[in-house]
Amino acid sequence: PLGTVEIEQPFWIGVGEISNRQLQRFLPSHDSGYYTKRHKQRYDDKGMSLRGANHPALKVSWNDAIRFCHLASAQTCLSISLPTEAQWEYACRAGSHTPFHYGDSNADFGLYENLADKTFVTYGFTGKSLTGKFEIEGGIDYLVAEGVDLADRRFDDGHCMTGPIGTRRPNRLGVTDMHGNVAEWTRSLYRSYQYDDRHGRNNLDAEGDRVV
């Protein structure tokens, strides 16, 4: 359910997700790796690379995200942190009252967000389609467990997996990729709605300790 939340202090937020290039400046050993369920050639390669310099960093723990904020703060002399859930949602909604900042579930997301779409369902398969699923070499029935049955085949954003940051149209605050591409961390406790600060939903400090 909708609720009223007051954000007491103004804040800045990055216009896009943290890229592999940005993260590796502070955590050089980070490797977003490959998506092994899709292949550009045959099924004996490593899968689709998620290592593009301007692609969002993946496989980042919450602790590493906090560490990145600390290191970036020290380098820039700014106070950089993960947003609270309220800050994140405010930046995502950008004043909209629809389920997504670009419209409802029937709106074509292709220009705005990288979500599970026609390309996600069909890219990288040589087998034949069977009852909405795919059969790859060796007769293995594939893909049901990874959410392909939930993909919206009506729309196509042109990406099977992650896409370069900032290539989709921004919302009204100029922020991109808030609904799609990859999920983002916040510094709020993970709890179900309804939003209520009295229960500590938004009270984590920079180390992840609960603030009473």
Image (cartoon, rainbow, N blue to C red):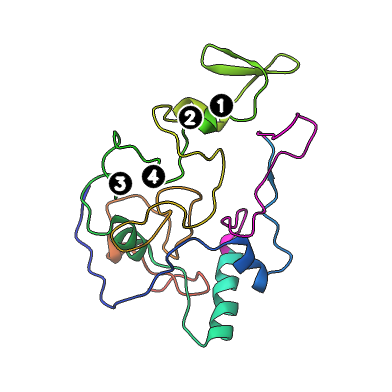
Residue displayed at 64% across by 54% down: 52
183 drawn magenta: no
Residue occupying the far bottom of the picture? 77
Question: What residue is shown with label 4?
Answer: 111
Q: Position of residue 174 (x, y in %)?
A: 34, 63
Residue displayed at 59% across by 30% down: 123
Which residues lie in the magenta part? 37-62
Q: Tell me, yes or no, whether the two marked residues, 4 and 3, touch with CB atoms within 8 Å.
A: no
As shown in the figure, which amino acid type bears the numbered disc 2? Lys
Q: Is residue 108 left or right of residue 158?
A: left
Question: What residue is shown with label 1?
Answer: 122
Q: Report the magenta stretch's main SS.
A: loop
Q: Tell me, yes or no, whether the two marked residues, 1 and 4, touch with CB atoms within 8 Å.
A: no
As shown in the figure, which amino acid type bears the numbered disc 4? Leu
Q: Is residue 195 left or right of residue 206?
A: left
Q: Position of residue 33 (x, y in %)?
A: 70, 50
Q: Which is more N-terminal, label 3 or label 4?
A: 3
Q: Position of residue 159 (x, y in %)?
A: 53, 40
Q: CA–CA distance between discs 3 and 1?
A: 25 Å
Question: What residue is shown with label 2?
Answer: 118
Q: CA–CA distance between discs 2 and 4?
A: 14 Å
Q: Tell me, yes or no, whether the two marked residues, 1 and 2, touch with CB atoms within 8 Å.
A: yes
Instruction: Identify the secondary structure beneath mark 1.
Output: helix
* Closer to viewer: mark 4 or mark 3: 4
As shown in the figure, which amino acid type bears the numbered disc 3? Phe
